[in-house]
Amino acid sequence: MKKLIVANWKMNPTSASQARLLFTATFAAARKLKNTKAIVCPPFVFASLLRASRSARLAIGAQDVFFESAGGYTGEISPGMLASLGVSYVIVGHSERRRMGETNEVVSKKIKAARAHHLTPIVCIGELERDDEGNYLAFVRRQIVESLATVPRKDAAALVIGYEPVWAVGEKAVRADTPEDFLEISIFIRKTLADLYSKNIAEKIPVLYGGSVSEKNARDFLEQGKAGGLLVGRASLDAKKFSEILFNADQTVQ
Ligand code: PGA
């Protein structure tokens, strides 16, 4: 299975011309990929600008989606609109959206709507803090069970899971997780998926790591952590760093 390296640009860069420049550099790096697929998730307004240069090694994703198809929902973007622009992936339930009030129930509706338009949901989960008693495992399990409540067995193999411990994400991150701890929790995530669906289906679902991924630690998460790919925030805004992450991922032997 190809490793998926997701560039989550968040609310960056600050202009269309800068978005084009960043995309051009990312596209150039992605052209050399053999075992890896880059998924660039720009802000909605830039998605149509980047569409023309889409290739098999690079897909466009969105950072969110609404669960209705059309109508009086001021400010929202439907899955059909994204699909019509050539967007093929969508991040759902990112911790920065959950922090703004998005619940597991809303996440599950978004996943269902995305699937109906053949968008691949990248479902984000992850605990706020890691305690020594292991309560975070129950929290992560509940997020998975509730967020995937709308996904029947026949659709489950088309999911992507992004494990992003909230304490490791963004400017305020304490540190990245360790590849060893990621490996442990990814086994737990797969076990939860196997309980929900089947062992066979659980093995087909890529589990990505996200949270302070850099050109320095990317390879360790893929090799020692056996991650199915990575979600990259800050480092995806620096074309040089992101190119290095793509290059390292492509060299990785799992
Ligand atoms: P970060 O963000 O790489 O800046 O920690 C990751 C993410 O939010 O997906």
Image (spheres, helix red, strand yellow):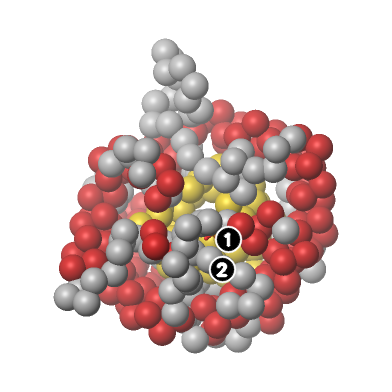
At x 82%, y 50%, the residue is 24
Give the crowd class for mark 1: few <14, some 14-19, many >=20 residues within 10 Å: many
Task: Tell me where residue 171 appears, x and y as whole percent.
Answer: 53, 56
What label sits on residue 249 in the rendered view?
none
Q: Secondary structure at mark 2?
A: loop
Marked residue nearer the N-terminal end (1 or 2):
2
Q: CA distance from mark 1 to mark 2?
A: 6 Å
Q: Is residue 223 above or below residue 186?
A: below
Q: Is residue 67 left or right of residue 193?
A: right
Res 67 → quadrant: top left
The quarter of the picture where the C terminus appears is bottom right
Task: Tell me where residue 97 appears, x and y as whole percent.
Answer: 41, 42
The residue labelled by disc 2 is 213
The three-letter code of the residue at mark 1 reads Val
The quarter of the picture where the N terminus appears is bottom right
Q: Is residue 236 above or below residue 204?
A: above
The three-letter code of the residue at mark 2 reads Val
Q: Nearer the viewer, residue 232 or 203?
A: 232
Res 87 → quadrant: top right
Q: Nearer the viewer, residue 154 or 84?
A: 84
At x 77%, y 64%, the residue is 240
Q: Secondary structure at mark 1?
A: strand
At x 29%, y 49%, the residue is 147
Q: Is residue 11 left or right of residue 242?
A: left
Q: Is residue 99 left or right of residue 76?
A: left
- Looking at the image, the residue that sits furthest to the top is 72
* Residues under numbered marks 1 and 2 in contact, where contact means CB atoms less than 8 Å apart: yes
Task: Tell me where residue 128 appears, x and y as whole percent.
Answer: 31, 59
At x 61%, y 70%, the residue is 214
Q: Is mark 1 within 8 Å of ligand 1?
A: yes
Q: Is residue 221 left or right of residue 165?
A: right
